[in-house]
Image: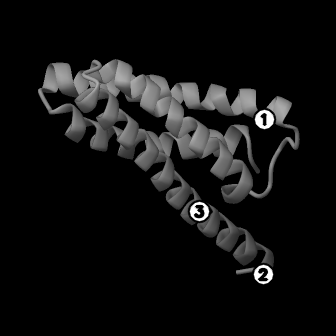
Amino acid sequence: MSLKFKIIQYSNQTEFARYFWAGGLATLADFAVLLLLTEVFDINYLWSNLIAVSVGLVVSYVLCFRWVFLDRRYNRVVLEFPLFVLTCIIGLLLNELLLWVFVEFVGIDYILAKVIVIGVVFFVNFGVKKVVLFR
């Protein structure tokens, strides 16, 4: 195995590890807002989820561009942020759809459904962001 390949492999592994931790922080923010809006303010879980995912998106944006992905395709926020939001819309739509299906058709509690959805969307978002925004 060549040194260049080893460096690239290590970079990808540490990048994924940073993405995992940043995703964890964004998920905590997302989950906290979901519970607060649904349980305390009695807002429908789908509306609460929409707002919660948006909060998580902002946390994720800051962490991804400041810490996770160090080799960026674009170095201007004017280009990056709209593309980042566009990639997150895919995750948001998938998040809402899966949450709705698990709660309404499978009959799972929205909190457990959210945990399952988080796992699925985590991997989809990583792949989409990696391809669209980073090298």
Chain-order first, disc 3 or disc 1 = 3
Residue at the spot of label 3: 18
Image spot of residue 62 (x, y percent): 67, 46
The amino acid pointed to by label 1 is Glu
The amino acid pointed to by label 2 is Leu
What is the spatial separation of the Cα atoms under label 1 and label 2, in whole angstroms?
31 Å
- Secondary structure of residue under mark 2: helix
Image spot of residue 64 (x, y percent): 66, 50
The amino acid pointed to by label 3 is Arg
View extreme (right): residue: 75
Image spot of residue 110 (x, y percent): 22, 32
The picture quadrant where one finds residue 71 is bottom right
Q: Quadrant of the N terminus?
A: bottom right
User: Is residue 90 depicted above or below 12 in this figure?
Assistant: above
Whether pointer 1 and pointer 2 mark residues with C-beta atoms closer than 8 Å, the reply is no
Residue at the spot of label 2: 3
Residue at the spot of label 1: 80
Give the crowd class for mark 1: few <14, some 14-19, many >=20 residues within 10 Å. Answer: some
Which is in the foreground here, disc 1 or disc 2?
A: 1
Which residue is found at the position 73% from the left and 54% from the top?
A: 66
